Amino acid sequence: MSSYVSATAADRREMLAEIGVSSIEDLFADIPARLRLDAADGALRLDRGRSEQEVYEELRALAARNISTEDELSFLGAGMYDHYVPALIDSIIGRSEFLTPYTPYQPEISQGGLQAMFEYQTAISELTGLPVSNASVYEGPSAVGAAGYVAKLTNGRRRFVVSRGVHPHSRETLLTLSRGYGMEVVEAPLRGGATVLPELDGDVSAIVVQQPNFLGAVEDLTELASAARDAGALTICACDPLPLALLKSPGECGVDLAVGEGQTLGNRLDFGGPSFGFFTATEALLRRMPGRIAGETRDVDGKRGFVLTLQTREQHIRREKATSNICTSQALNALAGVIYLSWLGKRGIVELTELMVKRTAYARARLTAIPGVALLHERPVVREFALALDAPAGRVIDRCLAHGVNPGYALGTDYPEHEDGLLVAITERRTRADIDRLVDVLGAAVAAERANVGAPA
């Protein structure tokens, strides 16, 4: 029995000539040699197979190397946050009608899934203050990149102005995608924790900001959006959804596209994912949005029903003219998000955010009373804030970790100008006693480093 070969040698030569390379190996020239298979015959050498028991033992040993937020007192944030996830969420998303279905192309048998999408869209629109939401995308940085493409399609301009306060992963994603469609990306600096826009000219397609920004500062979205509008540019805002319960919504501030990471809505940390990204916009941008949109309708008997109203991606039909290549949303994770919002309710989400604001203010005051610890900026904050340490941040963190406390994120990882900065996140899971514990451990660590007492414990 012979194998099916999709292309002949002549076909391959013709295709290689068309794209301007001489061999298939040329296509992999950018991959370092050390990462390539170097077997002479191209065969992949694998170890012998292992028994189920051996595989289980090895995976258990690997898992034991992880440290979860159940095992240490964590104040780590920087885009992923340790919020409480109610048992109700697992009990619903684990049901087979939600856990197993694929894309609901057949509305007559997919009413539950379509209704869940519709309810999710409604909740996200209410949070962001923008009228149109899709049924989710992969995660926050992807949403920022997709929003940039929408802006480019809308006005055809060639430059993005991106705040340095936007999450580093989102900036990297936008930069990578922008190269594919010929856009220039320039950075707007931070001053006193807030974004300072350069003069915007007629080449700027959109400004990209974050609320609150990566340093935890609440931005003046109204002013930023007004400056963009005066220059004929769009405003893209990457939002943290929970603070929107208290802050003025992006829609009220004049933002055109509000996108972001949905992990905080009923999704656990899970060592970085999966989660989901949300994507909302004004009605004028509806037909350029990525992904799909579920809509409400009436059937022939006048009964309420749900359908897939829009699928702008459709690359299998429109090919290179498609506005998106997103084939699947994170529907199960987005479902967890809407269950979480429903569980909290309109008043509950406000109370949760108010609690975080109070505990964050308490933590901010107590930590800055430590000698050698100061605020990196004095902007208003909600759940996260940045500190400047008069000691090497990495060594301070190591000392704290040795005592079972993760004090936060080392800002020098992404912001060399804040080499000894520390980003601290406070969620409802961090009690006042937990904050007091952080104060004691961090204070001792900073004092030891300032006195240069030995190596981190």
Image (spheres, helix red, strand yellow):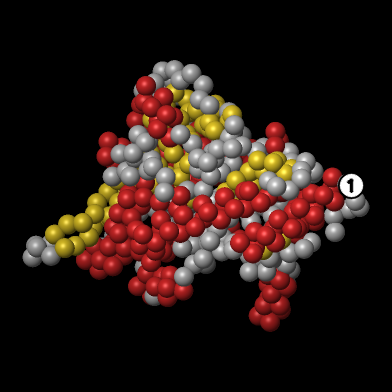
Residue sitting farthest toward the left? 301
Q: Residue at x 76, y 45 (%)?
A: 371
Mark 1 secondary-structure assignment: loop
Residue sitting farthest toward the right? 454
Q: Residue at x 62, y 53 (%)?
A: 363
Q: Quadrant of residue 107?
A: bottom left
Which residue is more in the foreground, 390 or 113?
390
Indicate left or right for 163 with 399 as reference: left
Indicate left or right for 41 with 190 as reference: right
Above or below, 22 against 361 in this view is above
- Give residue 402's position: percent from left, percent from top: 79, 61
Indicate left or right for 309 with 63 as reference: left
Q: Which residue is mark 1?
A: 452
Which residue is more in the foreground, 351 or 312?
351
Q: Quadrant of residue 403?
A: bottom right
Indicate left or right for 303 with 377 as reference: left
Please, what is the three-letter code of the amino acid marked with disc 1? Asn
Q: Residue at x 71, y 56 (%)?
A: 439
Q: Is residue 368 visible?
A: yes
Above or below, 375 against 407 in this view is above
Q: Quadrant of residue 404?
A: bottom right
Q: Residues within 10 Å of mark 1 (few under 14, many from 20)?
A: few
Q: Is residue 314 visible?
A: no
Which residue is more in the foreground, 36 or 133?
133
